[in-house]
Image (tube, rainbow, N blue to C red):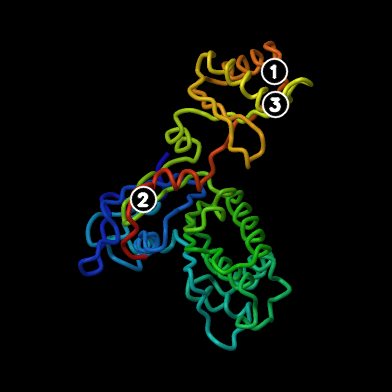
Amino acid sequence: MTAIVATKGLCHSYGGMVALNQLDLEIPPGAVYGFIGPNGAGKTTTMRILTTLLRPTQGEAFVAGHSVLKERAAVRRQVGFMPDFFGVYDNMTAYEYLEFFAGAYQVAPERRARLIGDLLALVDLGHKKDADVMGLSRGMKQRLSLARTMLHDPALLILDEPASGLDPRARVELRELLKELRSMGKTIMISSHILTELAEMCTHIGIIEGGNLLASGDVASILRSLQPHRSFELHLLPAEDQTMAEAHAVAMALLSTQPHVLEVRSLPDDAPPQLVVDFDGDDRAASQLLAHLIQGGIAVTHFAGQINDLEDVFMRVTEGSAYGGTT
């Protein structure tokens, strides 16, 4: 399947400062691609190049098969860009704001009223149609900006820090809206330095730091590559004549003799009483491990695999790297 975004050896410098260093990434159609990195990692620079707002120092980038260097107009027809700062003109209503940009996007006048009404309904701002834009809340402005990016029905939405400054309710509303857009077939590239904002919505991620792409791909594959073994959390119930420490000692002795068990450890005294088992077997081997514990007389009340999240991935990939570059 042809990537909707592809970069090859993409480089950009601001004077003597390297913002992007040989960036090679691909985003498949229909993906929600989380572009993750600290402030100054190169996220915004990449997005500006993909939207033809900035020419790279070196390399090439393609959007829907069109070169950002040679086919700028074609690229702009395929992209809806939502920058991290919402800029508007004074004394405009929400409807007038969208009508102005519909004209800029050369939407036929006879189509504008219905299109704007549909987009306001999609972002749940129909009731704010005649409201002054500058009087809208931060969350409403973000949703209105998102409606603007879709006026020309682009295949790719590029959203730079869209949740920045939003309250918890507005973040939930934005997340649900992005899910709806993906269900409509849109490909979404979304940047953030706050990992929890992206954890529940991304199908693919790219981790960038100091202008270097450290990892990129679907979330499941990256998790597998960074976690060669799994960890299981066990909660035990001691026998009537046992203390919890004694029950742990018996279980640890039994576990340490089993195949695929790499390490067994008990959590510190100030943590909830439990064991953690590092394990490199498959699901069948894990079920056999649990069965062996029960057959050995160990009362197991909880047995579950620990799941890495995007924050775990980010910390592993960027460990020891120096922050740098520009935005």
Q: Quadrant of the C terminus?
A: bottom left
Between tags 2 and 1, which lies in front?
1
Q: CA distance from mark 1 to mark 3?
A: 7 Å
Q: Residue, x 56% and y 26% (percent of image)?
A: 277
Classify 30 as above or below 90.
above
Tell me the residue at 59%/35% (across/down): 267
* For residue 97, side relative to residue 294 (left or right): left
Is residue 14 in view from this perspective?
yes
- The reply, left or right, for residue 21 in relation to residue 293 is left
Q: Tell me which label, 3 or 2, sits earlier in the chain.
A: 2
Q: Amino acid at mark 3?
A: Leu
The x, y position of residue 52, in whole percent, is 35, 65
Query: Tag 2's secondary structure?
Result: loop
* Front label number (3 vs 2): 3
Q: Name the disc covering residue 65, or none.
A: 2
Circle 2: is it few (<14), some (14-19), or many (20+) Cα within 10 Å?
some
Rendered image quadrant of residue 38: bottom left
Q: Residues within 10 Å of mark 3 (few under 14, many from 20)?
A: some
Say which element carries label 3.
Answer: strand
Which residue corresponds to mark 1?
A: 298
Residue at image mark 3: 236
Q: CA distance from mark 2 to mark 1?
A: 59 Å
Q: Secondary structure at mark 1?
A: loop
